[in-house]
Image: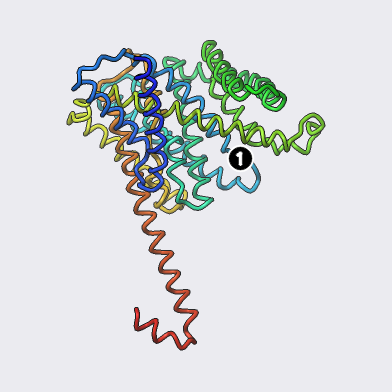
């Protein structure tokens, strides 16, 4: 039995890796394939009569570890600098305002028209307002450098802001105004702790010469996150600060710190650490989505009410996005419109909502449908955007060829061939 379990786990990792590679060419995001794989496995188990232990309780655990890794990975892509001020401002504006507008509208609908309490409506609306950086960033592969950076900043900030707001609402659901000052003090305390923890972990990353080091850093980050959550601190601020500090170490390499740190060696250590972290994140994220698909209720996905609710949420997301990108930020609708998928964080936050605060119009099947629809639309948008780029490149090439041969005798031959 042990060998069969090992065989299955290895095959799942290899399939996830294959999905990740082929998604760059097929434009079918790996997340859809992973969830689909989980659904197929469930059908096989049901139809063959196999008995497997119920490990659904592990889903939030794996998801939380994945969340920590995704936020840290996203924060390590947030490079600061004067030349990026405009880009950061636009992406931060899009992330924060679109999130706030969508959550406010959805909360208003739930509370005003469906009769739910404000705290219940708000906590159920927040997960749907968050863009998944884990899905959006890999899908921006065909964009130019500035467009990619916009997607990185917008999706990463959307993750971070959404999670912090969710934590705040969950802690102070009945006393928002009183909780705001308390949360601000806790955030300040967290920043102080983050500076100490970041410094300690950075020293460990740089100074440890033992062959086991990177996994110790990752374990320490997860440990500090869990301890911070237990004492009700905004734990993700610790992860965020750690990632941003590592990503922007060059800002302090010309200060007195250079007497104690070999920044060239530190850069190499950091590159290796990020590579290990990326691979670990890939494994955790893959198993999470496979498990999520495995425990998805197929009948619920085909429920008319669930489909209608999911379509209404998706419609609201994209209408707001079109208006804001076009009218306020003056950005092109393509490719940015469809690069706002929902993913792991939406699932994880929804699973974190206490049963007493759940509302009936929103359930796990609605969450799954919203994720699948948003990723499917992103896939369609990427396909059409790539086709437009290919056509534009071919047109510009034709223009160059014709311009080069205007005074050439071969122009007659070219026109004839055209």
Q: Position of residue 294 (x, y in %)?
A: 29, 24
Q: Residues within 10 Å of mark 1 (few under 14, many from 20)?
A: some
Q: 231 and 100: which one is in front?
A: 231
Q: Residue furthest top?
A: 231
Image quarter of residue 231: top right
Tell me the residue that label 1 is attached to: 79
Q: SS of the residue at dot 1?
A: loop
Image quarter of residue 187: top right
Q: Is residue 173 above or below residue 87?
A: above
> Which colour style is shown?
rainbow
On the question of residue 319 being in view, the answer is no
Going 37% across and 45% down the picture, which residue do you hit?
Answer: 338
On the question of residue 245 being in view, the answer is yes
Going 44% across and 85% down the picture, which residue do you hit?
Answer: 410
Q: Position of residue 20 (x, y in %)?
A: 41, 39
Image quarter of residue 28: top left
Q: Position of residue 124 (x, y in %)?
A: 35, 24
Q: 339 and 319: which one is in front?
A: 339
Count of labels shown? 1
Q: Position of residue 5 (x, y in %)?
A: 36, 19
Going 36% across and 14% down the picture, which residue do you hit?
Answer: 57
Q: 33 and 320: which one is in front?
A: 33
Quadrant that contains the C terminus = bottom left
Q: Left or right: 78 with respect to 416?
A: right
Q: Is residue 387 above or below residue 75?
A: below
């Amino acid at each position: 039995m042990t060998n069969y379990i090992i065989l299955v786990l290895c095959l799942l990792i290899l399939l996830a890796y294959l999905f990740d590679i082929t998604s760059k060419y097929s434009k079918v995001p790996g997340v859809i394939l992973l969830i689909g794989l989980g659904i197929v496995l469930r059908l096989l188990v049901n139809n063959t009569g196999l008995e497997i232990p119920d490990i659904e309780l592990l889903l939030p655990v794996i998801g939380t570890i994945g969340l920590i890794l995704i936020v840290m990975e996203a924060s390590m892509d947030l490079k600061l600098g004067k030349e990026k001020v405009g880009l950061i401002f636009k992406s931060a504006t899009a992330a924060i305002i679109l999130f706030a507008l969508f959550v406010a509208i959805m909360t208003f609908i739930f509370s005003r028209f469906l009769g739910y309490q404000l705290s219940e409506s708000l906590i159920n609306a927040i997960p749907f307002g968050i863009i998944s950086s884990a899905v959006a960033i890999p899908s921006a592969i065909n964009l130019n450098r500035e467009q990619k950076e916009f997607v990185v900043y917008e999706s990463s900030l959307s993750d971070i802001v959404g999670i912090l707001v969710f934590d705040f609402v969950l802690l102070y659901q009945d006393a928002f105004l009183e909780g705001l000052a308390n949360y601000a003090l806790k955030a300040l305390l967290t920043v102080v702790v983050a500076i100490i923890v970041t410094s300690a972990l950075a020293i460990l990353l740089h100074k440890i010469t033992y062959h086991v080091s990177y996994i110790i850093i990752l374990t320490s980050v997860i440990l500090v996150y869990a301890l911070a959550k237990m004492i009700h601190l905004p734990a993700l601020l610790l992860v965020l600060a750690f990632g941003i500090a590592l990503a922007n170490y060059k800002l302090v390499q010309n200060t007195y710190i250079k007497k104690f740190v070999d920044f060239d060696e530190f850069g190499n250590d950091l590159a290796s650490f990020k590579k290990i972290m990326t691979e670990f994140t890939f494994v955790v994220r893959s198993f999470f989505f496979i498990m999520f698909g495995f425990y998805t209720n197929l009948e619920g996905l085909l429920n008319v009410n669930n489909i209608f609710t999911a379509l209404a949420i998706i419609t609201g997301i994209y209408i707001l996005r079109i208006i804001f990108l076009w009218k306020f930020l003056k950005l092109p609708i393509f490719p940015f419109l469809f690069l706002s998928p929902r993913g792991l964080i939406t699932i994880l936050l929804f699973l974190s909502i206490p049963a007493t605060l759940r509302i009936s119009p929103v359930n796990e099947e609605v969450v799954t449908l919203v994720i699948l629809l948003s990723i499917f639309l992103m896939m369609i948008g990427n396909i059409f955007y790539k086709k437009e780029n290919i056509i534009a490149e071919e047109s510009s090439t034709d223009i160059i060829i014709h311009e080069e041969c205007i005074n050439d005798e071969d122009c007659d031959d070219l026109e004839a061939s055209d």
